[in-house]
Amino acid sequence: MAGEPQSDCLFCKIVAGEIPATVVRKTERTLAFRDIHPQAPTHVLVIPHAHYPNAAELAAAEPEIAGELLAEAGEVAKDEGLDSYRLIFNTGAGAGQTVFHAHVHVLGGRTLHEGLV
Ligand code: 5GP
Ligand code: ZN
């Protein structure tokens, strides 16, 4: 069923507590934790507990949770003291997506105005 945990999914395992993560925020429907290979001083991933392969599919199926993901990304930035930050949703292997459970990267703490990539 759509949204159900997948046994072969790394982020479903993090949600289930089977793989440790440095959690910075948690709600009933979302989890925010530090990326294991940070690309900036702040690099946090915000994910829904529910399994969807990417952000657009999450938004199509559960728009309220997609909205909550964005709101939580903003709260993470606030908690980290960031007034400027970047949100990234890699979608598809060709765009660099490596974990096929919807997530938004929250990046900040360094200059990010050079360009989009
Ligand atoms: P993607 O490339 O799919 O947009 O982002 C996946 C992110 O997950 C990468 O930035 C990668 O560093 C991060 N990541 C991969 N494995 C783990 C892990 O086991 N723990 C944490 N905290 N992050 C991970
Ligand atoms: Zn998953």
Image (cartoon, rainbow, N blue to C red):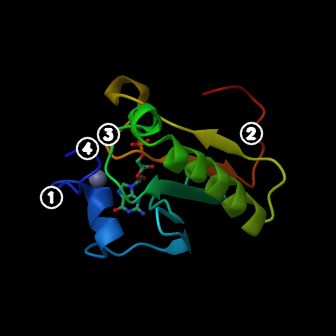
Disc sitting over residue 112 in the figure: 2
Disc sitting over residue 7 in the figure: 1
CA separation in Å, label 4 and label 1: 14 Å
Instruction: Assess disc 1: are there few (<14), some (14-19) or many (≥20) residues with their C-alpha within 10 Å of its C-alpha.
Output: few
Instruction: Assess disc 2: are there few (<14), some (14-19) or many (≥20) residues with their C-alpha within 10 Å of its C-alpha.
Output: some
Question: Are discs 3 and 2 less than 8 Å apart at CB?
Answer: no
* Between discs 4 and 1, the one toward the N terminus: 4
CA separation in Å, label 1 and label 3: 13 Å
Question: Are discs 1 and 3 less than 8 Å apart at CB?
Answer: no
* Between discs 1 and 3, the one toward the N terminus: 1
Instruction: Assess disc 3: are there few (<14), some (14-19) or many (≥20) residues with their C-alpha within 10 Å of its C-alpha.
Output: some
Q: In terms of depth relative to the viewer, which is nearer, 66 or 13?
A: 66
CA separation in Å, label 3 and label 2: 27 Å
The x, y position of residue 78, in whole percent, is 77, 62
Q: Secondary structure at mark 2?
A: loop
The x, y position of residue 117, in whole percent, is 60, 28
Q: Secondary structure at mark 1?
A: loop
Q: Secondary structure at mark 3?
A: loop
* Between discs 4 and 3, the one toward the N terminus: 4
Identify the image quadrant of residue 73.
Answer: bottom right
CA separation in Å, label 4 and label 3: 10 Å
* Between discs 3 and 2, the one toward the N terminus: 3
Task: Answer with left or right where residue 101 lies relative to residue 83.
Answer: left
Residue shown at 70% from the left, 61% from the top: 75
Task: Answer with left or right where residue 43 lies relative to residue 54.
Answer: right
Residue shown at 74% from the left, 47% from the top: 85
Residue lying farthest to the right in this orientation: 83
Identify the image quadrant of residue 109.
Answer: bottom right
| Residue bearing the label numbered 3 | 53
Q: Amino acid at mark 2?
A: Leu
* Between discs 1 and 2, the one toward the N terminus: 1
Q: Amino acid at mark 4?
A: Ala
